[in-house]
């Protein structure tokens, strides 16, 4: 772990929650940390070089931008796994791709732009990758989304939080304008680590800094942007166990149990997804912890408090791909 001291810990926690959408964001962060803009920039650059921070930028809601997205589970013969992962990684709409401990051993997210058929794209990938079977697991209901790792540690991994992120309002949205699309393209870039980073992004998009920030705030208000924040390399930040908890919950209890599971601080994502004859689980919780023992502790606490004993923890054993989808670029 490359976090040097308590200031690094506080800075990383701030960066993950809500990066200031202001002309001098690092100065705003410096004021919150009682230090200087230069010191904050130096720390962020170092944490980036040490690969604790992956990227600082906008995290968008694909659906609210007009895209379709889905979690996909594939069963691949072990001897073909790397070749299959390489084929799947080549798709520009695949942002995450992991090997997990299950007979469905390859898990990836697939996003396609308006006008493309998501199921057809998934079936094409299945054929080209040589997967034996494939299950599409779209979101039926979202209870929580947002990886915010508490790098300071020292607290019970199974503690509760009030930081669950509700699904955005479902009010219909007007199509994005050309200027808004330009803003999305700019805001999804990795933020330059300099005093006026939004001015640099705005210049590349052919607009003023004030215009770009206005678009950013509006996209956030409309739920098209979930947040503007740092994404960390989990393992470098000390969170070496990544367990996907899958739960067989009676359908009539799914909403109540999903809302309860979302209150756990170690749960970054909580969704209801469809079942299949060979896949009985309908609730998914992503658990990030400092060890497999801690992960098991969180899952066991969730099971005890919800009364759901039919569950499994699928650990990621290899990360084949983890990037952000590039919107309006393919």
Image: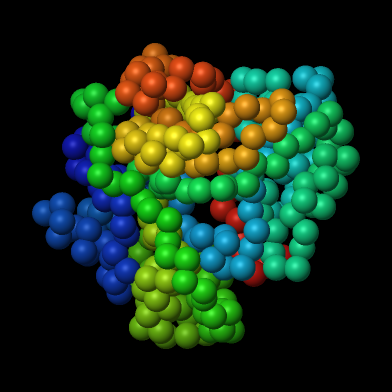
Residue at (54, 80) in percent of width and height: 174
Q: Could you say where residue 3 lies in the image, as x and y percent from the top left?
A: 30, 35
Residue at (43, 56) in percent of width and height: 167
Residue furthest to the front? 252
Horizontal relation, residue 316 to residue 20: left or right: right
Residue furthest to the top? 293
Q: Could you say where residue 290 lies in the image, as x and y percent from the top left?
A: 37, 23
Q: Specify whether residue 150 is in view.
A: no
Residue at (40, 76) in percent of width and height: 218
Color style of the picture: rainbow
Q: Could you say where residue 50 lies in the image, as x and y percent from the top left?
A: 42, 39
Q: How many callouts does the rendering have?
A: 0
Horizontal relation, residue 244 to residue 155: left or right: right
For residue 155, which quarter of the picture?
Answer: top left
Q: Nearer the viewer, residue 67 or 257?
A: 257
Up-down relation of residue 232 to residue 227 (above or below):
above
Q: Specify whether residue 91 is in view.
A: yes
Up-down relation of residue 75 to residue 97 (above or below):
above
Horizontal relation, residue 67 to residue 37: left or right: right
Residue at (58, 79) in percent of width and height: 175
């Amino acid at each position: 772990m490359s976090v040097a001291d308590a200031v690094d810990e506080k800075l990383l926690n701030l960066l993950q929650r809500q990066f200031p959408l202001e002309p001098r964001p690092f100065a705003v962060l410096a004021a919150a940390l009682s230090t200087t803009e230069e010191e904050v920039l130096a720390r962020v650059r170092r944490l980036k070089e040490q690969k604790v921070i992956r990227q600082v930028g906008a995290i968008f809601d694909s659906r609210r931008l007009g895209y379709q997205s889905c979690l996909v589970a594939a069963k691949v013969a072990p001897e073909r796994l790397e070749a299959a992962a390489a084929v799947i990684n080549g798709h520009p709409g695949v942002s995450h791709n992991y090997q997990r401990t299950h007979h469905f051993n390859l898990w990836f997210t697939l996003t396609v732009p308006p006008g493309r058929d998501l199921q057809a794209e998934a079936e094409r990938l299945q054929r080209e990758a040589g997967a034996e079977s494939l299950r599409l697991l779209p979101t039926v209901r979202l209870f929580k989304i947002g990886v915010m790792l508490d790098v300071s540690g020292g607290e019970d991994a199974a503690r509760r939080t009030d930081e669950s992120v509700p699904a955005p309002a479902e009010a219909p949205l007007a199509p994005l304008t050309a200027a808004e699309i330009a803003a999305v393209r700019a805001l999804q870039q990795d933020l330059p680590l300099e005093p006026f980073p939004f001015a640099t992004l705005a210049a590349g998009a052919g607009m003023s800094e004030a215009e770009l920030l206005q678009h950013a705030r509006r996209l956030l208000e409309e739920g098209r942007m979930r947040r503007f924040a740092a994404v960390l390399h989990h393992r470098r930040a000390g969170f070496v166990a990544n367990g996907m908890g899958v739960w067989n919950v009676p359908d009539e209890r799914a909403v109540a149990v999903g809302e309860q599971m979302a209150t756990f601080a170690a749960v970054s994502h909580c969704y209801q997804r469809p079942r299949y004859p060979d896949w009985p689980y309908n609730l998914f919780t992503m658990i990030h912890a400092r060890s497999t023992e801690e992960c098991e502790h969180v899952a066991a606490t969730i099971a005890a408090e919800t009364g759901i004993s039919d569950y499994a923890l699928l650990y990621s054993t290899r990360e084949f791909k983890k990037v952000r989808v590039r919107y309006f670029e393919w």
